[in-house]
Image (tube, rainbow, N blue to C red):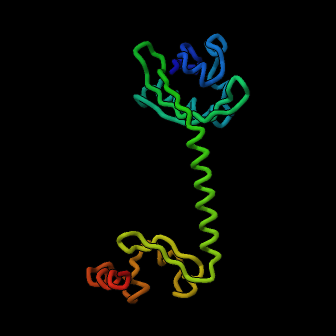
Amino acid sequence: VCSLDSKGILVNVGPASTFLLKFQVDELLGRKISSLLSADDTSKALISLDKLFSGDSASVTFENTLRRGDGTAIDLSWSCRRGDDDLAICVAQDVTEKNKALKLLKQSEEAFREIVEGLPVAVVTCDKSFFISAVNSKATQLFSYASSELLGKNLALLLTGVSDSSAQSLARISELVD
């Protein structure tokens, strides 16, 4: 927890912030938050804080990567609201591990998509209502449809040649799946 003035200067820093940021209190007080951020992150943070101080928003949230006192980087998710004393009261949460996990998940999903795309067979995936959510290139070749023509359509289109989601078509699909 910390407080920032309208210029982005740290005016109050809680003990957890010193632990999280690896700075002593006296190293943080009076310091501009922008001095700890990259140029891209600085502009995002300052735009959010400007919305807060201009009265456009009662609270703001944003994420950025901050350079800690020991030189390491930490990803923070900020939640700020304007206090009675015309300061922004901010709570920062470490989301470094969450962001790493999301990045790994994204890489895994991309690797999976590449594997499915490279398969020598047609692959069509659907949601629970039998609406097509993905197809690989072999499916588009086999069924002579562009992927854009299939995505969001009912699987009945490929199985019956009819593009509807009527109860009758769904019943036929359910019979095939069971």
Q: Is residue 176 above or below residue 10?
A: below
Residue 144 is situated, as x and y percent measured from the top left of the image, at: 53, 87
Q: Residue furthest top?
A: 26
- Total label count? 0
**Residue 120's quadrant in the figure?**
bottom right
Question: Does residue 147 appear left or right of residue 27 in this picture?
Answer: left
Frontmost residue, 153 versus 53: 153
Q: Residue furthest front?
A: 178
Q: Is residue 23 above or below residue 170?
A: above
Question: Does residue 164 appear left or right of residue 43 in this picture?
Answer: left
Q: Residue furthest left?
A: 167
Residue at the image position 60 percent from the left and 67 percent from the top: 113
Residue 177 is situated, as x and y percent measured from the top left of the image, at: 38, 81
**Residue 117's quadrant in the figure?**
bottom right
**Residue 56's quadrant in the figure?**
top left
Residue at the image position 35 percent from the left and 71 percent from the top: 129
Question: Does residue 163 appear left or right of residue 109 in this picture?
Answer: left
Residue 108 is situated, as x and y percent measured from the top left of the image, at: 61, 59
Residue at the image position 46 percent from the left and 32 percent from the top: 60
Residue at the image position 60 percent from the left and 73 percent from the top: 116
Q: Is residue 145 above or below residue 68?
A: below
Residue 14 is situated, as x and y percent measured from the top left of the image, at: 53, 16
Q: Is residue 110 above or below residue 53?
A: below
Q: Residue furthest right?
A: 71
Quadrant (top left/top right/bottom left/bottom right) for the C terminus: bottom left
